[in-house]
Image: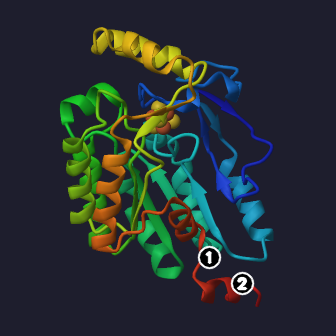
Amino acid sequence: MHLVEAKGILSNTNGINIYRGCTHGCIYCDSRSLCYNMTHAFEDIEVKINAPKLLEKKLAAKRKKCMIGTGSMCDPYLPAEKELKLTRSCLEIIEKYGFGAAVLTKSDLILRDTDILASINEQTKAVVQMTMTTFDEALCRIVEPNVCTTQRRFEVLMEMKKRGIPTVVWLSPFLPYINDNEENLRGLLNYCAEADVKGIVCFGIGMTLRDGNREYYYAALDRHFSGLSEVYRREYGNSYEIVSRNNDRLMRMLNDFCDKRDIICDVQKCFGYLNEMPEKYEQLSFF
Ligand code: SF4
């Protein structure tokens, strides 16, 4: 872990990334790809130690209230966050200035901040997003080795439900020949139904592979799924988008499931929901 003084924190789309790199160890992680030009080992996380200060300056000067997102490039609840409390500090600033928050994580450490998320949600809007890929707990430990498993993430969703905080689940990625099957999807969807999620983000049944993450993924396949990397090489070559042969069938299953339960599952509509600030709060900010 190394600490840096960042120059900026808020992106043009109102996103913040407090950390760079990640220690959760997901075998398929796209953020490892060479195109992101990491200048340090991916697990040697960069900590933007001045993130709360930068965020406060930005939000104090912003006239129009909006949703502030975090978690797109790295998880805001890495184990280091337990001590550093930078994500928590940023949430406190979001609360103080009357903005909304949309937080994406795989970690149950977010439960520590339920109080502040509930307070933001009472004041404006907070949405907790959990990524879930693998229903089978033993398989999940292989695929996402250093973070809590899917069952625990489901418990987080249930806690948010109890507190009235809306949730969105990211079902992504699905790894061909590993978890791209009906049993897995059914298990994950049952969790979503029980937790009353507002939306499901799913880009299709498949994954992406590019230079950097492909090598890491194939090495993990060689350790845990003998012979499978050869199958991938043969079937997918150097393709970026890897679409499961079960894509059409499973996407139909997902769409039918969401239609019946009124869950948003169109990706653009989901993003619309995540970015949408309740109108009355947008207006309030002009006074
Ligand atoms: S949590 Fe996200 S950023 Fe971290 S290793 Fe997993 S996929 Fe990569």
Q: Secondary structure at mark 2?
A: loop
Closest to the observer, 129 or 116: 129
Per the image, the residue denoted by label 2 is 285
Q: Quadrant of residue 191?
A: bottom left
Q: Is residue 243 above or below residue 91?
A: above
- Report how many numbered discs are placed on residues in the image: 2
The circle drawn on residue 265 is none
Q: Secondary structure at mark 1?
A: loop
Residue at x 58%, y 18% (from the top left corner): 212
Measure how far apart labels 1 and 2 are at the Cα level. 8 Å
Residue 206's x, y, as percent?
43, 37
Closest to the observer, 188 or 163: 188
Observer able to see residue 5: yes
Residue at x 54%, y 79% (from the top left corner): 124
Q: Is residue 171 above or below residue 274?
A: above
Q: Residues within 10 Å of mark 1 (few under 14, many from 20)?
A: many
Q: Amino acid at mark 2?
A: Ser
Residue 11's x, y, as percent?
73, 53
Confirm or reject: label 2 Cβ below 8 Å from ligand 1: no
Do the residues bearing badges 1 and 2 touch, measured as CB atoms within 8 Å? yes
Looking at the image, tell me whether mark 1 or mark 2 is earlier in sequence order.
Answer: 1
Q: Residues within 10 Å of mark 2 (few under 14, many from 20)?
A: some
Residue at x 48%, y 63% (from the top left corner): 266
Q: Is residue 242 above or below residue 270?
A: above
Closest to the observer, 77 or 270: 270
Q: Quadrant of the N terminus?
A: top right
Observer able to see residue 108: no
Q: Quadrant of residue 173?
A: top left
Per the image, the residue denoted by label 1 is 98
Horizontal arrangement in the rendering, residue 72 relative to residue 128 (left or right): right
